[in-house]
Image (cartoon, rainbow, N blue to C red):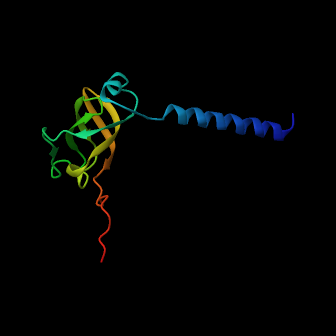
């Protein structure tokens, strides 16, 4: 067999392995219930901040730990432990997307995305 064919087979094999690994590590949008069932997988949880519950952020003790409660789109409220500092304008956010895993009934997030209210409104510009 020619060396070119052997190299081509190896390249195709590596490409298939990379594709399989990337499919295995993909995350999906979900809710707290599914995240609790599959606690070994990472999920994106979409929800809103539960402003009736306490938020705990003590940067003098641990600046990379922020705890709060989130209600997912199906109405389930869970405690969230964000392993980052408290984001700026966190309390103003309309919607929150968490990326992480459920462990012992607490969602441990390693990343967060905030959807904040727009600075702009739909009103027409003022004529001068």
**In this rendering, is residue 28 above or below 63?**
above
* Residue at the far bottom in the pictured view: 128
Q: Nearer the viewer, residue 72 or 108?
A: 72
Q: Tell me, yes or no, if residue 82 can be seen here.
A: yes
Q: Nearer the viewer, residue 34 or 126?
A: 126
Q: Tell me where residue 101 sits by quadrant.
A: top left
* Residue at the far front in the pictured view: 127
Q: Point out residue 5 in the picture as x, y percentages from the top left corner.
A: 82, 37
* Residue at the far right in the pictured view: 1
Quadrant of the drawing holding the N terminus: top right
Q: Tell me, yes or no, if residue 86 can be seen here.
A: no
- Taking 8 as reference, is 32 left or right? left
Q: Which residue is drawn at 28% across and 47% down?
A: 84
Q: Which residue is drawn at 30% across and 33% down?
A: 73
Q: Point out residue 4 in the picture as x, y percentages from the top left corner.
A: 82, 41
Count the numbered circles shown.
0
Quadrant of the drawing holding the C terminus: bottom left
* Residue at the far top in the pictured view: 37
- Taking 36 as reference, is 1 left or right? right
Q: Point out residue 72 in the picture as x, y percentages from the top left corner.
A: 28, 33
Q: Which of 84 and 33 is in front in this view?
A: 33
Q: Which residue is drawn at 79% across and 36% down?
A: 6
**In this rendering, is residue 29 above or below 121?**
above
Q: Point out residue 118 in the picture as x, y percentages from the top left corner.
A: 30, 56
Q: Which residue is drawn at 71% across and 36% down?
A: 12
Q: Which of 105 and 122 is in front in this view?
A: 122
């Amino acid at each position: 067999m020619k060396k070119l064919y052997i190299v081509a087979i190896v390249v195709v094999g590596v490409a298939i392995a990379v594709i399989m690994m990337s499919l295995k590590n993909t995350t999906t949008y979900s809710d707290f219930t599914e995240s609790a069932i599959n606690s070994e997988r990472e999920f994106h949880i979409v929800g809103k901040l539960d402003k009736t519950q306490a938020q705990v952020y003590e940067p003098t003790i641990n600046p990379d730990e922020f705890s709060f409660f989130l209600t997912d789109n199906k109405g389930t409220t869970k405690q969230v432990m964000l392993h980052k500092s408290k984001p700026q304008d966190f309390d103003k956010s309309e919607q929150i997307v968490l990326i992480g895993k459920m462990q012992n009934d607490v969602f441990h997030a390693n990343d967060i995305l905030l959807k904040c209210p727009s600075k702009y409104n739909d009103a027409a510009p003022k004529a001068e």
